[in-house]
Amino acid sequence: MDPITLGQGVEPLPRRLSHYVVLTLASVLAPGVVLVVTAGALAVRARHGGRAWQVVVDTSDDVDGALTALLAVALLAAAYVVGYVARELAFAVLGFVERLGTGSLPSASALRRQLVETFGQAAVQDCLRAHPLLDHFLGSPQEPTPVRWRGGGSLRLDNGLEAFLYAKSWLGLTAPNDAPNDIETEINVLLSLLLPVGLGGWTVVAFAQPGPAVTALVAALTAGTWWLLLVSALRLRRAERWESLRGMVAGHAMGLAAAHQRGLTLAVPQPAPDPGALPAGGEPTVA
């Protein structure tokens, strides 16, 4: 079933919708607005040269309220399309870097070893007995070869990804606060900044017309920012996969501990009633 329709006492639909809205605003619409405005500024600069700012001011004076609203809607529509395409291109770059091997995601077998090293064999086995499908994903004797289909975010479809998606979905249903949605949002935001940073550096050089030294400095700062964004995104992609599985094992262990504690509470013998105590009516009974 679709996880949106499942709840178990939770209300995942509003939570998922709010997460999607925040994700879209932060990683698609806002960067898209920056890209469209920056590209427009570069186009005006290329056409009018040093008069670019004056042309923008003169044009804005001739725009009335209705046309302003129409232009705002057109800007948002263009920003959504441009921002979405820019984010997909950034994910393609990230996927290419991961396939080079330097930032590859952990395999299913590596994730299982890390879980055992962290929580111990007994705790991991207790969790996997309750989730046989997850046990299958993490217990394959070898990693499957990459398949033709690639999921969103340029992810390779293998058992490591399947284990991550299973754990993430389970946490989203049973413990939404432990699901790694914040990490997913941060990854999307970091990657959506790649093109705006590059175009922003180009815009600074185009409008300021600096000398070779300053131009080289801007280029170096842009390249350094790109490197920092990609390294951070790679680190968070690995952390996202680990945090989902860690949350599953830890949550299962805590659930068993809570159930055991409730069992101990119920097993405590209750004191026998006092024969001389007054009944509910208030008068002692006479034999």
Image (tube, grey):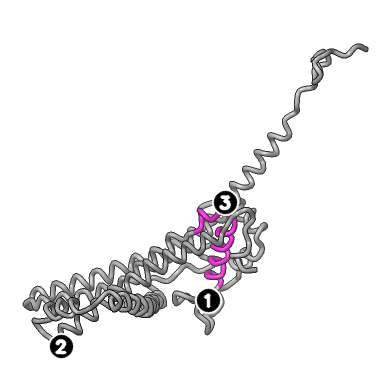
Q: Which mark is residue 251?
A: 3
Place of residue 279 in the rendered image (x, y in percent of width and height, measured from the top left):
81, 18
Place of residue 41 in the rendered image (x, y in percent of width and height, measured from the top left):
20, 79
- Mark found first going from the N terminus, 3 or 2: 2
Residue 97 can be seen in this image:
no
Q: Which mark is residue 47?
A: 2
Task: Give above or below for 112 relative to 268.
Answer: below
Task: Give above or below for 143 relative to 13.
Answer: below
Task: Give above or below for 244 relative to 98.
Answer: above
What's the distance in space between the residues labelled 2 and 1, CA to CA? 47 Å
Residue 245 can be seen in this image:
yes
Q: What amino acid is found at the position of numbered circle 1 in the picture?
A: Leu
Say which of marks 2 and 1 sits in front: 2
- Mark found first going from the N terminus, 1 or 3: 1
Place of residue 66 in the rendered image (x, y in percent of width and height, measured from the top left):
30, 76
- Mark found first going from the N terminus, 2 or 1: 2
Magenta part, dominant SS: helix
Are discs 1 and 3 less than 8 Å apart at CB? no
Q: What amino acid is found at the position of numbered circle 3 in the picture?
A: Gly
What's the distance in space between the residues labelled 1 and 3, CA to CA? 26 Å
Task: Residue 166: say if magenta.
Answer: yes
Q: Residue at x 41, y 69 (%)?
A: 24
Place of residue 39 in the rendered image (x, y in percent of width and height, measured from the top left):
24, 80
Say which of marks 3 and 2 sits in front: 2
Query: What element does badge 1 sit on?
Result: loop
Stretch of the chain drawn in magenta: 159-179
Q: Name which quarter of the figure residue 261 lies in.
A: top right
Q: Name which quarter of the figure residue 78 lies in.
A: bottom left
Query: What element does badge 3 sit on?
Result: helix
Q: Residue furthest right?
A: 287
Question: Which residue does the numbered mark 1 point to in the structure image?
Answer: 157
